[in-house]
């Protein structure tokens, strides 16, 4: 069974199979990998049937093409829902998608660093390249006319790692008074602004990415001739990244009275994840813990009174998308689904499918990174939900609430 999962997560053998054996032995033969494999295979067969194909006689290529066609069909439904016209180019499409979701209840208000606190940090550490690229002659004008999240987003892209480390290191003390419940900010750029930013890029930029420490979603006005599945793709990425913001916001809220709060913000800004503990040598992050608490009441007492049930709600992105238009509900439950044959691995993850459709990838070059990451996360979460790993969570949560021995910084 582990070979099927190994193919989906793109793991190296025999290392992966040995890890599964260790996890299974440590959990008294829980069979987590066997049940997850069975769930994935059953889910794939169900979706094959929904596509009108024969589950007993469908090849990887047939499934792949059917998924592409389904994505194209559902993209048209979503375009109509959002109000995107046939004449709209990719930049106009992304602008309308961003505007739609920035006002959507699917994007929650979160516990986050105050804009004024971020603005103060930026004033103390002036991002000179950012100021020039955004065409400002003075810091005062920059800070007055641009939002702190927008300045920080550009600085993150073009100022370089040294600047970001210096900025983050300057966070000496933070308290709960430096945080507030606020809407996620959607940072957008005109094509001209993005053209200027691209000239100074220090790293590759994906179409949508999040900045948890700034409570912001950054949407790039990607200029591409192809717009097929672009709407579905960007919408899915926005929901994917907004969920990431929510997961990390719950952690900062949990830590709101910690005297080391600034260290938690620094850690999140530097690494993009909050490392919690290890499971048979595999890193467990806060987003894994968030999933565990979302599905069970066990251990939630450690998060009280700051973190509530709303903070811990977890919804798969494709289920959220179905809330926009029930016509695209086919994708619900596909985030962990992948078809494995001797020749090909076919991802049913909506983002993978949309990327393959948008860039017209042949099956031999098909992407499946998102399903790989999601299946790996699902595997970790499911093991965390069985003894004795549940007891490990309790012990670590106790340590996290013990200021005398905070394991995060031992």
Image (cartoon, rainbow, N blue to C red):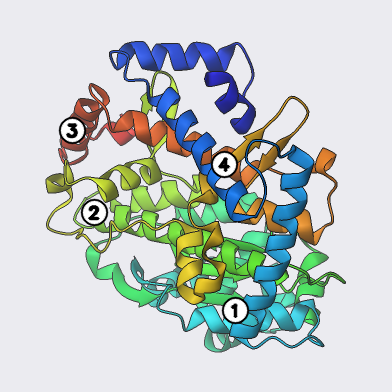
CA distance for labels 4 and 3? 37 Å
Q: Which residue is mark 4?
A: 45
Q: 146 or 15, which is in the foreground?
A: 15
The Cα atoms of the two marked residues, 2 and 3, are separated by 15 Å
Q: Which is more toward the observer, 195 or 259?
A: 195
Label 3 belongs to which residue? 394
Q: Residues within 10 Å of mark 2 (few under 14, many from 20)?
A: many
User: Which residue is identified by label 1?
Assistant: 98
Q: First in sequence: mark 4 or mark 2?
A: 4
159 shown above or below 194: above
Q: State yes or no: discs 1 and 2 in contact (Cβ < 8 Å).
A: no
Residue 26 in picture, x, y percent from top left: 32, 13
Task: Calculate the distance from the C-alpha at mark 3 to the C-alpha at mark 1.
Answer: 40 Å
Above or below residue 83? Residue 259 is above
* Mark 4 vs 3, N-terminal side: 4
Quadrant where the image shows the C terminus = top left
Q: Which residue is mark 2?
A: 254
């Amino acid at each position: 069974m582990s070979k099927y999962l190994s193919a989906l997560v793109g793991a190296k053998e025999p290392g992966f199979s040995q890890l599964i054996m260790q996890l299974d032995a440590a959990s008294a033969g829980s069979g987590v990998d066997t049940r997850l494999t069975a769930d994935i295979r059953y889910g794939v067969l169900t979706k094959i049937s929904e596509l009108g194909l024969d589950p007993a006689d469908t090849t990887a290529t047939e499934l792949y093409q059917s998924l592409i066609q389904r994505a194209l069909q559902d993209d048209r439904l979503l375009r109509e829902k959002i109000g995107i016209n046939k004449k709209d180019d990719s930049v106009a499409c992304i602008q309308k998608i961003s505007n739609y979701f920035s006002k959507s209840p699917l994007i929650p208000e979160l516990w986050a660093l105050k804009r004024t606190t971020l603005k103060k940090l930026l004033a103390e550490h002036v991002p000179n390249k950012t100021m020039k690229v955004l065409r400002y002659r003075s810091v005062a004008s920059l800070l007055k006319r641009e939002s702190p999240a927008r300045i920080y987003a550009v600085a993150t892209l073009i100022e370089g790692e040294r600047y970001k480390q210096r900025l983050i290191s300057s966070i000496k003390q933070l308290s709960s008074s430096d945080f507030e419940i606020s809407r996620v900010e959607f940072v957008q750029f005109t094509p001209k602004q993005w053209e200027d930013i691209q000239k100074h890029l220090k790293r590759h930029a994906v179409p949508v990415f999040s900045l948890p420490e700034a409570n912001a979603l950054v949407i790039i006005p990607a200029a591409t001739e192809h717009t097929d599945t672009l709407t579905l793709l960007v919408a899915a990425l926005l929901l994917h990244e907004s969920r990431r913001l929510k997961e990390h916001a719950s952690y900062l809220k949990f830590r709101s009275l910690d005297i080391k709060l600034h260290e938690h913000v620094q850690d999140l800004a530097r690494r993009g994840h909050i490392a919690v503990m290890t499971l048979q040598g595999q890193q467990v992050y806060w987003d894994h813990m968030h999933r565990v608490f979302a599905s069970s009441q066990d251990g939630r007492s450690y998060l009280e009174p700051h973190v509530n049930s709303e903070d811990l709600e977890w919804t798969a992105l494709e289920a959220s998308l179905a809330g926009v238009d029930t016509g695209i509900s086919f994708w619900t439950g596909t985030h962990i689904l992948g078809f494995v044959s001797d020749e090909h691995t076919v991802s049913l993850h909506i983002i993978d499918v949309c990327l393959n459709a948008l860039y017209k990838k042949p099956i031999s070059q098909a992407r499946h990174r998102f399903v790989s990451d999601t299946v790996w996360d699902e595997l970790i979460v499911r093991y965390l939900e069985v003894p004795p790993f549940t007891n490990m969570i309790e012990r670590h949560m106790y340590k996290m609430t013990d200021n005398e021995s905070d394991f995060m910084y031992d």
